[in-house]
Amino acid sequence: MTKPNFLIAPEWILVIVSALWGTSFYLLSLSLQDISPGLLVAVRFTFGSLIMALILRGQLLTIRSKDIIAGFATGTFIFFGYFLQTVGLQTIQSSISAFLTALYVPFVPLLQFILLKKKPGWIVGSGIFIAFCGMVLIIDPTKLSFNGSFGEWITVLSAVSCALEIIVLGHFAGLCEPKVFCFTQLVSVAAWSWFYCASFEAAHLTMTPSLVICLSILTAMIVFNQYAMSWGQKFVPASRAVLIYTLEPVFAGIVGFLVGERLTTMALIGAFLVVGSVVCSNWLPGYLKSREKVSDAS
């Protein structure tokens, strides 16, 4: 993949995406005190769509069928990632849901191999394995117990959907203009969310200053994140992108610590493994290449 003519490396853009995801957990928990989950997603993505429409303006008339297909495919997997996880949470503990959702990390290279016959290099593959182990430690495996229930299998499907989102987004990112791609994704998720609210959810909403502030920040986050992913994954392969996204629980833990939550030793070890795997996967390949050049020169 060609490198962009841009001041910030795409890998760092995806790190910022992970940081915003981690921060959003606290804002979401505050928001859900005043609004139902499906309605929150619908409102968030609807206002995100309107913001992108204002940014695009005249470009809306030049959207291609390719952009619509790309946005619908990616947006569908984004929505079902949210939807299936929410359904699963109705019958299983949040700790089990968090662990099963984290399976999207190993699912990305597995599905890439099954669907596209692509497999990651040994450095990225090892990094994915170590990062997943770190995520498990952050979640705290001592709280986990499984019984093969419907909720657990639904949550596994949620992880599959999250993995497919990253793969499909990476596939279309090089074919679409990032802002247009972002817009069609947001519209697709909004449409699916309103359908879900009308069909399955007893929606409730209590307007409070706290909710308005949280929704405003969350909407801005989702616009930036979907645009940043649409741009960043033009240059970063899906297997490396998913490794960077494993930083999400690390940032969530930092935010939790800042608002008074206690970090366990196990979580700190897990965070170290995640950060170490991300750093090595981006630094080690360049180091090995430089060593090869020195060896060839001598």
Image (spheres, rainbow, N blue to C red):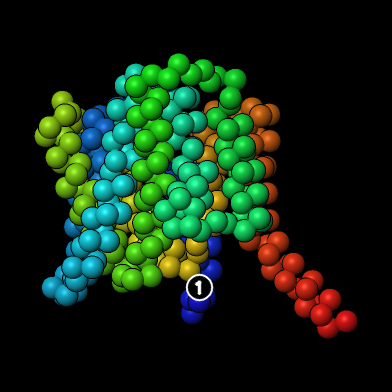
Q: Who is closer to the viewer here, 253 or 166?
A: 166
Q: Residue 124 sits in which quadrant?
A: bottom right
Residue 134 horizontal/vertical position (percent): 62, 38
Q: Who is closer to the viewer here, 221 or 70?
A: 70
- Furthest-bottom residue in this view: 297
Looking at the image, can residue 197 be seen?
A: yes
Residue 6 horizontal/vertical position (percent): 49, 76
Q: Quadrant of the C terminus?
A: bottom right
Residue in the image at 61% along x and 51% along y: 125
The residue labelled by disc 1 is 1
Neighbours of disc 1 within 10 Å: few (<14), some (14-19), many (20+) = few
In the image, residue 70 above or below residue 194:
below
Residue 243 horizontal/vertical position (percent): 55, 51
Secondary structure beneath dot 1 equals: loop
Q: Residue 50 sits in which quadrant?
A: bottom left
Residue in the image at 50% along x and 73% along y: 1
Residue in the image at 44% along x and 35% along y: 101
Looking at the image, can residue 216 be seen?
A: no
In the image, residue 262 above or below residue 7:
above
Residue in the image at 28% along x and 43% along y: 79
Q: Which three-letter amino acid code belongs to the residue tagged 1?
A: Met
Say left or right for 261 vs 298. left
Say left or right for 79 vs 11. left
Residue 23 horizontal/vertical position (percent): 45, 43
In the image, residue 126 above or below residue 203:
below
